[in-house]
Amino acid sequence: MKERIVLVLAVLTVVGLFAVNIVGFVDTETGSALGCGHDWPLCNGAVIPHVWGLKTLIEFSHRALVATVTVLLLITSVSAWVLYRGWVEVRALIAVTVGFVFVQAGLGALGVIYGDPPWFLAFHFGFSLLAFVGAMLLVIVLRQIRKSERRDKGSQAAGITSSGVLRHGSVPLRLSRLIWFTIVYMYGAMYFGAYVSSTGDGSAFRGWPFPTEAQSPSVFIVDIVHRSIAFGLILLILYLAVLATRNGRKRRDLLAGSWITFILALCLAFTGALLVWSHQVLWAFLLHISFVTFVFGALCYLALQSLPEPKSRVIKHPRTD
């Protein structure tokens, strides 16, 4: 029962962090970041502002949501640590998630007090993405642990000693390296995209799949670079899926995960086209950001699954001689 409650709390934390990121993006794109003035943690000099406007409502809602989700995250982290502190994956993911949530909150406070230059906003989004992915992977690991524990009970009945293996089967070094390289590549691509969005250059992008904003040479170059990086990401993920297919019999989790990642990457490209066609309306932005999150999360899942099991986890079959 306790395990189920912790898993539910972890799922709610993931949903909450996703909502925080989406509302935070709305906050930035609508120019509401200073809806509470330069005060933090107060809002216009009060815990609850006396005068309300749309920007104040958006900024205050964002702060309230961050506070609520942070409390939920701390409860989830303590509960998961108590129940599963023997699992190195749980300890690492709790540290990653909690650490980046507090870094994200600190950056948000600094942005309110001192201002948000484009590079600063890009870093803020990058850390928020890492916090979300950490929480998402924690949910996956908790589910894997529950399945492993049920499997171990059956193994013990058959005379097999198991210490809880989460990932079965080896991963070719070439595939593992490509997964991690693609993650680094996408993280860099995400920073560039966030920077372009923060500078406002993206609003001048025209034409798809080929840019047509020739009247602004500097924006045209930025657009070319951005689309080239995006195309490179799709090719990398496709190559990753092909390699996973060659190893599919041994690791069906990587096979399915890599092709799902590729489909999500195609959806991400389509939302990029929507941004251009719609002249960057807010709903298209939110779709694009959502699929950025999904693709990066899927890649990080593949990275998790490619990790070797700790040496302490062994499966010993009974001797038959």
Image (cartoon, rainbow, N blue to C red):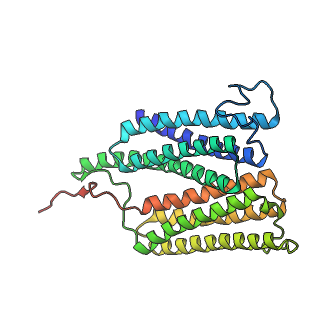
In x, y percent, where is residue 98?
49, 43
In x, y percent, where is residue 90?
41, 46
Q: Quadrant of the N terminus?
A: top left
Using the rendered view, name the quadrant where residue 241 is placed.
bottom right
Q: Nearer the viewer, residue 29 or 242?
A: 29
Write the residue at 34% across / 49% down.
Answer: 151
Furthest residue in direction front, as rendered: 114
Q: Quadrant of the C terminus?
A: bottom left
Furthest residue in direction left, as rendered: 321
Write the residue at 26% across / 56% down.
Answer: 314
Is 320 left, or right, of 77 in this rendering? left
Q: Nearer the viewer, residue 58 or 305?
A: 58
Is 107 left, or right, of 29 in this rendering? left
In x, y percent, where is residue 191?
63, 61
Task: Please indicate, yes or no, whether residue 1 appears anywhere in the rendered image.
Answer: no
Is 231 left, or right, of 164 in this rendering? right
Q: Nearer the viewer, residue 57 or 145?
A: 57
Label tally: 0
Q: Is 119 placed above or below 152 here?
A: below
Q: Is 171 placed above or below 42 here?
A: below
Write the residue at 39% across / 39% down.
Answer: 81
Write the residue at 67% across / 69% down.
Answer: 230
Furthest residue in direction right, as rendered: 215
In x, y percent, where is residue 76?
48, 36
Q: Nearer the viewer, residue 7 or 198?
A: 198
Task: Please indicate, yes or no, whether residue 159 appears anywhere in the rendered image.
Answer: yes
